[in-house]
Image: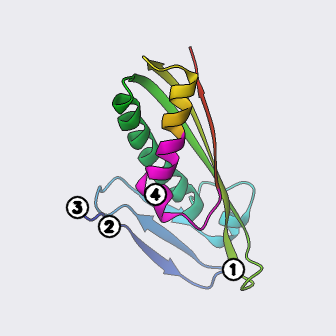
């Protein structure tokens, strides 16, 4: 399996510095990051590690779920997956940590009922490689079929 690469160039202190995250392998873009924008309610056009984790998690989860739906005898017509990744204080070391991830999935699926879809959705949450990498973070799931 391939290895994918990203890089960040950072200048300055945490409070006053900023950087650029480059998606090196795909060459799909370079994005601004800064701690003040990371910690603000309005990101002001900058991304954050939490947003990048959310993007990685939703895409990985959608792939895993589509495979599990097919294994269960269903056909995924469409899956809409979002992830809310929260950052908060880490009381253990005084820094910060991811405090939770809420995955939400809505699926149009032929051949599975709600119970079958929920079973596949829970299995995908446990089995997707990004979920496995994030075992130190509480991950919750809201899964439902749509018609």
Q: Residue at x 51, y 27 (%)?
A: 116
On residue 15, which mark appears?
Answer: 1
- The numbered disc on residue 5 is 2
Determine crowd level at label 1: few under 14, some 14-19, many 20+ residues with C-alpha closer than 10 A: few
116 over 30 or under it: above or below: above
Q: Nearer the viewer, mark 2 or mark 1?
A: 2
Question: In the shown orientation, is residue 56 left or right of residue 75?
Answer: right
Displayed quadrant of residue 93: bottom right
In the rendered image, residue 134 lying in the magenta stretch gets the answer yes
Residue found at the far top of this picture: 147
Question: Label 2 vs label 1: CA separation?
Answer: 26 Å
The residue under the point 53% across, 19% down is 113
How far apart are the alpha carbons under marks 1 and 4?
29 Å
Binning the other alpha carbons within 10 Å of mark 4 as few (below 14), some (14 to 19) or many (20 upward) gives: some
Q: Which residues are magenta?
A: 122-138
Of residues 33 and 110, the one drawn nearer to the viewer in this rendering: 110
The residue carrying mark 4 is 130
The residues bearing labels 2 and 4 have C-alpha atoms spaced at a distance of: 16 Å
Label located before the other in sequence (1 or 3)? 3
Quadrant where the N terminus sits is bottom left
* Label of residue 2 in the image: 3
Question: How many tags in the picture?
Answer: 4
Asked if the stretch drawn in magenta spans residue 85, the answer is no
């Amino acid at each position: 399996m391939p290895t994918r690469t990203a890089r960040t160039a950072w200048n300055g202190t945490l409070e006053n510095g900023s950087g650029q995250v480059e998606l090196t392998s795909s060459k799909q873009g370079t994005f601004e990051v800064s701690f003040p924008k990371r910690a603000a309610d309005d990101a002001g056009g900058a991304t954050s590690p939490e947003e990048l984790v959310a993007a990685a998690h939703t895409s990985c989860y959608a792939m895993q779920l589509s495979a599990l739906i097919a294994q269960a005898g269903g056909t995924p017509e469409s899956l809409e997956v979002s992830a809310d990744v929260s950052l908060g204080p880490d009381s253990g070391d005084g820094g910060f940590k991811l405090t939770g991830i809420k995955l939400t999935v809505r699926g149009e699926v032929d051949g599975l009922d709600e119970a079958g879809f929920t079973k596949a959705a829970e299995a995908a949450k446990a089995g997707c490689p990004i979920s496995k990498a994030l075992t130190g973070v509480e991950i919750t799931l809201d899964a439902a079929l749509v018609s």
